Image (cartoon, coloured by chain):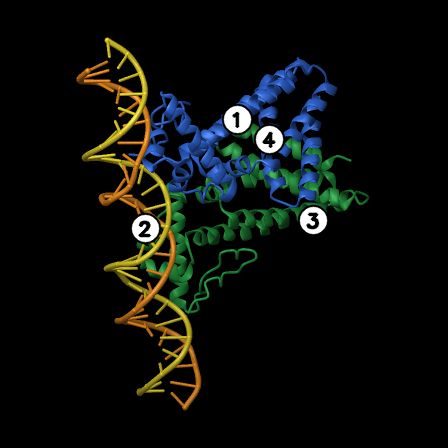
Chain colours: A blue, B green, C yellow, D orange
Amino acid sequence: MDDTEATVSSQEQIASPRRAPSQQRSRERVERMLAAASALIAEQGSDAMRMGEVAERAGVSIGSLYQFFPDKRAIIWALAERHTTESQACISAELKDVSDAEGLRRAFSELVDIYYRLFLAEPVMRDIWSGTQADKALRQLELADSRANAEFLVAVLKRLRPGADPVSLETTAFLVWQMGEAAMRLAISVERQEGDRLVAAYKRMALRELLAE
Amino acid sequence: MDDTEATVSSQEQIASPRRAPSQQRSRERVERMLAAASALIAEQGSDAMRMGEVAERAGVSIGSLYQFFPDKRAIIWALAERHTTESQACISAELKDVSDAEGLRRAFSELVDIYYRLFLAEPVMRDIWSGTQADKALRQLELADSRANAEFLVAVLKRLRPGADPVSLETTAFLVWQMGEAAMRLAISVERQEGDRLVAAYKRMALRELLAE
DNA sequence: TTGCAAATGTGAGGATTTCTCATGTTTTCA
DNA sequence: TGAAAACATGAGAAATCCTCACATTTGCAA
């Protein structure tokens, strides 16, 4: 039916390289492809990115591109996945040792600021995560990432409120996290000043929820 | 000659009908085109919707389609605009007479339920508003709509908290509204039960913020 | 009623873009 | 050293969006 790559019913990898580069030479070429794609997205957005252009800028043929990426979305997905992997480490580190309300307030505030700065500064991230909804695979990746990050929050909340209902904590954390991403997307698409206000309001709102009894 | 958009150098024109149907016959045909597009989006999503298929199902030629819609996005935009126009009336009606905290609680809760039901039931709305981010014109429409709806909330808040800073109220209302849309999108992309919990959590969170001193 | 201009209708084909595949080259390793 | 596996290539197949030159219908002034 669909040619949409295996469409595994469970939560398997959605888009994976058609063939993993095994030689040093091809690994370097794949890096060049990703770098070229990243640059083009930064310049014109992922929608306007042309596969031919990616190949040309990477100094490879169009055929080589398709040797390692089954389709256009896969190359964007690969970039997105790098971002999530990187930022999860950062999030984990920030929340790992939080054990009281004041610590959560400080860590969460710091985290929001980091994300906001990242969104403002990284055109690729900006582009990829705003177009997220249209692409099933990216949407999946985002949800999975959100859940993973929410888990760090849940761990903290369980420490702060041992008696609370775990399901309720999960829900709160997941929602707060997703709303953070929504707030970021909103903030970067309006004037800087209003964006700052929106992020600050989000921070206050989220903390009010996270610290509520 | 058709001045499609006369290459406006400043801001891109929001897509508008290339030519407004002035005769009864063409008005009916445009309706058929929109109905066909709507049905196809419901069936397969706007991305998979083919212009040729829209024309065929509407019983018109591909040329006629392009007579009234400058491009594919325009036809989706037209559907989206109808939705916003319809729902604004509903929102205004619901919030218009609110004058105390209890009234706001009730009206807001009602509104969230209506929206949630709408998102669950209307595949077209679901599709259009989840792909929103990728399309500049749609994103603009959504933001404008959100601002307009937030205004209704601001009006209520000003009544409830006359002393509050107006800018702060605007920010809160706008954020709360956008987060509501994010919460809806999230809720419909997970299991129904979890979706219900998320919507309930959003409602609580938003009301806490709206009713805070 | 008549006749013409404006509005509308048509669909083959131009233009663009993604992705394939038959074929050639380089690397690995027994 | 030689064969198999991995990698590289780019012309062109396939899929779509959209245009345009020309045909038909409608509104309306004379």
Is the C-beta separation of discs 2 and 4 under 8 Å? no
Q: Residues within 10 Å of mark 3 (few under 14, many from 20)?
A: few
Q: Callout 1: residue from which chain? A: A
Residue B65 visible to an observer of this rendering:
yes
Q: Are marks 1 and 3 on the same chain?
A: no
Q: Callout 4: residue from which chain? A: B
Disc 4 and disc 3: Cα gap in Å? 24 Å
Is the C-beta separation of discs 2 and 3 under 8 Å? no
Type of amino acid at the residue the image marks with label 2? Glu
Q: Which residue is mark 1?
A: A84
Helix or strand or loop: what does disc 1 sit on? Answer: helix
Helix or strand or loop: what does disc 3 sit on? Answer: loop
Quadrant location of the C terminus of chain B in the rendered image? top right
Q: Callout 2: residue from which chain? A: B
Residue in the image at 50% along x and 53% along y: B82
Q: Which residue is mark 2?
A: B53
Q: Quadrant of residue A54?
A: top left
Type of amino acid at the residue the image marks with label 4? Ala
Residue B200's label in the rendered image is 4
Q: Are marks 1 and 2 on the same chain?
A: no
Q: Are marks 2 and 4 on the same chain?
A: yes
Count of number-bearing discs: 4
Judge by depth and name the residue closer to the eye, B48 or B100.
Answer: B48
Judge by depth and name the residue closer to the eye, C25 or B112.
Answer: C25
Type of amino acid at the residue the image marks with label 3? Asp
Q: Position of residue A181 (x, y in %)?
A: 58, 33
Type of amino acid at the residue the image marks with label 1? Thr
Q: Are marks 4 and 3 on the same chain?
A: yes
Which mark is nearer the camera, 4 or 1? 1
Q: Which residue is mark 3?
A: B97
